[in-house]
Image: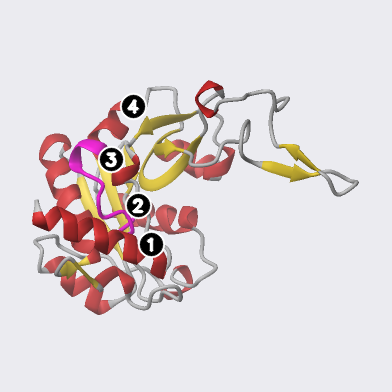
Amino acid sequence: MTPLYIIPARGGSKGIPRKNIKPLGGRPLIAYTVDAALAAQKTTGGTILLSTDDAEIAATVEAMGVHVPYMRPAELATDTAGSREMMLHAMDWAEAQGIEFDCVVLLQPTSPFRTADDILACIEALGENDDMAVTVTEAHDNPYYTIFETSADGTLHISKGDGHFSRRQDAPKAWVYNGAVYAIRPASLRRMALGEFPRRIPSVMPQERSVDIDNELDWIVAETIMARRMLE
């Protein structure tokens, strides 16, 4: 497949201001995603497209050797703008420029520990008849064992199953999206929202590479992991 790697990085961020270019381990956060995309591109070919509305973010990525000819329109850079709409606009722009691709690979900068091998494994997992392959990690909480819902009378009942598992390892595994890699068929994305895809294929990543930075606590965790890596 020939990927269109889309790195979304809008300037506004309420949880962590300017997080995409905030230094992590002495480098802008987005640098780790750019590194992984460039390394994966050596194997797959394709095009890396930064989707940003911010000149400083664009300049940061340009300095890393990725040309930034495209800027995201302001209406797609708000807190309420959806990822699908952002990707569709980037796809339309790429097609208008004559850029060929048959797979869209979304790489969010908030996953700094994802590797090029993680990207390649996710792309490889996308079958001809699949809508999307997505990176996952084993859920910390399990709906068969540790997740409960409230009944009409106010009591708790297990979210899934009969609640008879006495050991966590006996319960069916549950997975969560870790936000690191989404490999998507362009035709599927044009037809429906990501949550409506009938064929979503998991590409498993370990928890230590699955940190997704959304708030200050996530940032502290990422800093701790990065500091330990730098000591190794």
In this view, the mark in front (2 or 4): 2
- Residue at 70% x, 28% y: name it: 163
Q: Which mark is residue 125?
A: 4
* Residue indicated by mark 2: 211
Q: Earlier in the sequence, mark 4 or mark 3?
A: 3
Is residue 149 toward the left or the right of residue 93 in the image?
Answer: right
Q: Earlier in the sequence, mark 2 or mark 3?
A: 3
Q: Position of residue 24 (x, y in %)?
A: 21, 67
In this view, the mark in front (2 or 3): 2
Q: Which mark is residue 218?
A: 1
Distance of label 2 from label 4 (alpha carbons): 21 Å
Give the residues in magenta. 108-118
In this view, the mark in front (4 or 3): 4
* Residue indicated by mark 3: 101
Asked if 33 appears above or below 151 in the picture, the reply is: below
Distance of label 1 from label 2 (alpha carbons): 7 Å
Say what amino acid the circle numbered 3 marks: Phe
Q: Earlier in the sequence, mark 2 or mark 4?
A: 4
Mark 3 Cα shell of 10 Å, populated few (<14), some (14-19), many (≥20):
some
Say what amino acid the circle numbered 2 marks: Val
Q: Secondary structure at mark 3?
A: loop
Quarter location, residue 19? bottom left
Residue at the limit of the structure toward the right, as seen here: 153
Is residue 192 toward the left or the right of residue 214 in the image?
Answer: right
